[in-house]
Amino acid sequence: MSADREAPLGWIYLKMYDDESFEFISQGMMRDKDIYVGNYKLKHDTLYFKYKDSIPKAGSKAIIQKGFVNYLNGNYSESLQVKLNNLPVSK
């Protein structure tokens, strides 16, 4: 799955892979970027992110709803538009 949004001074990207790994990338206009990596679990419409190092301020839990990934437990509300979704449906 791939989701993103334009931020005031750059872009926010979420890239999720078949092996349940992911990258959450915050990239500024001056080419600086913060990359957070780890593994995820998908249960119904909820994503649980386990980060290898630090956790971004968006949080570690999100819901997929109406074409968006909406983070639920961060320091601020983050919403990324899904551009490509090949995630399997979980039970």
Image: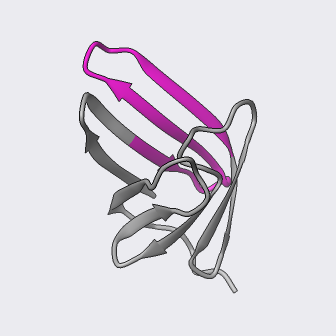
Indicate whether residue 34 is drawn in magenta: yes
Magenta segment, which residues?
Answer: 13-38
Indicate whether residue 59 is drawn in magenta: no
Counting from the top left corner in percent of width and height, residue 91 is at 70, 86
Q: In the rendered view, does 15 fall on the left or right side of 74? A: left
Residue 37 in the image: above or below residue 49 = above
Residue 37 in the image: above or below residue 79 = above
Counting from the top left corner in percent of width and height, residue 71 is at 52, 59
At horizontal 58% and vertical 38% (from top left) the residue drawn is: 56
Looking at the image, how many numbered discs can be counted on the residues? 0
At horizontal 59% and vertical 33% (from top left) the residue drawn is: 36
As drawn, which residue projects farthest toward the front?
A: 75
Q: Main secondary structure of the magenta part?
A: strand
Counting from the top left corner in percent of width and height, residue 81 is at 32, 60
Please identify the quadrant where the N terminus is shown. Answer: bottom left
Residue 84 in the image: above or below residue 76 = below
Quadrant of the rendered image containing residue 52: top right
Residue 1 in the image: above or below residue 46 = above
